[in-house]
Amino acid sequence: MGHLKFKVGEITAVIGDNADHAPASGHRAGYNGIWDFQHRTSMRSIFVPTYAGLNLEHIFNGETEFEHNDIFFEPRRAPMTFRKLNDQQAELHQPATPTFHVESTTRFTLRAPWYLDLDFRCTPHQHVHQRGWFGCFWASYINGPADKSFYFLGGWHPKESMWMQLCTQAHDDESTVRAHDDDFKLTWLEGSRDSLFKNFSRMRYAKPLCYGNFENLVYILMFKPEAGIRLTHSPSGGGFNKDFNTTNPAWDWQFIVPKYDVMQEYGYHARAVLRPRCSREEILDEYEKWTNE
């Protein structure tokens, strides 16, 4: 079986690989990670049912990903293996991919009352990143929220830390928010296609966390203070939602490895929170409590 439902505390999550398990599940091939994520007070998943959230979508290096879609979406199409570890934990493993030669393991852990932790590790197996760096990109397709924005602490100028709102006007439009101290410049193959990770907002973030509103819930995404995380937004990345006559936004992120060695492991820790609406002070408390663990 390539997927399984988990229930811990007030949340349920279906964790699965990128294979085609329709029509039994309604899930489409090419989307991995969290197929379904619900709080007990909600009647629907925060993620678009046919797609996924926390979905490893791209590996990119400024050069190779632009050849064709099978390479652009290689992590969604290369085989991966699902494994249940225990009643609250599962793992997705993808052997070194055929083009980028990056092996990865993602461990998902549900914790009461409303936490879903992600531990990502990747290892480049060959020197195929001509520009000396590579990145990985995750997409979360949000299921027709009334408010498409996500919110974060940051500003337009160094050291600013006020609440900011990002709702891009179009796909690939000023889509990526970097940290205040993230000055690593990515370069691209001349004339290559546009993408979310090539376009940058003038805003910067002060802490690696953001949140969005969904029904009577708040969805918080946060990262341990490790280098390399960039936050990304699209107002329509998940397509059109006919049930709500609106688009499904994508609340995404990237992990950048500025300089790599073959067979060296790289990674980070993240936490997704799906809980009843709360104050911004409580959101920051969630972040501080977790990062200080």
Image (cartoon, helix red, strand yellow):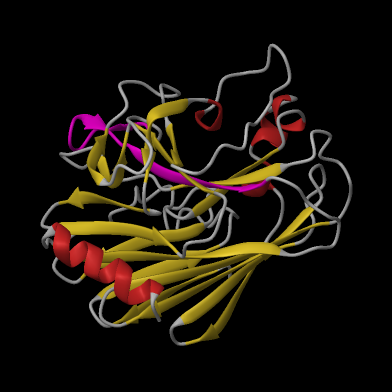
- Looking at the image, residue 106 sits to the left or right of residue 153; the answer is right
Q: Position of residue 230 (x, y in %)?
A: 49, 44
Looking at the image, can residue 142 be seen? yes
Q: Is residue 122 above or below residue 160?
A: below
Residue at point 31%, 67% (across, down):
287
Position of the C terminus, as image quadrant, is: bottom left
Find residue 67 and report its image quarter: top right
Position of the N terminus, as image quadrant, is: bottom right
Q: Which residues are magenta?
A: 238-257
Front residue of 288 and 22: 288
Front residue of 26 and 236: 236
Q: Position of residue 103 (x, y in %)?
A: 75, 59
* Residue 248 is inside the magenta segment: yes
Q: Position of residue 151 (x, y in %)?
A: 25, 44
- Looking at the image, residue 25 sits to the left or right of residue 284; the answer is right
Residue at point 84%, 34% (across, down):
130
Which residue sits furthest top? 191
Which residue sits furthest front? 159
Q: Is residue 253 above or below residue 131?
A: below
Which residue sits furthest right? 127
Q: Position of residue 267 (x, y in %)?
A: 63, 62
* Residue 213 is inside the magenta segment: no
Residue at point 79%, 40% (across, down):
132
Looking at the image, can residue 238 be seen? no
Q: Main secondary structure of the magenta part?
A: strand
Residue at point 83%, 55% (across, down):
261
* Total numbered badges shown on the rendered structure: 0
- Looking at the image, residue 112 sits to the left or right of residue 293; the answer is left
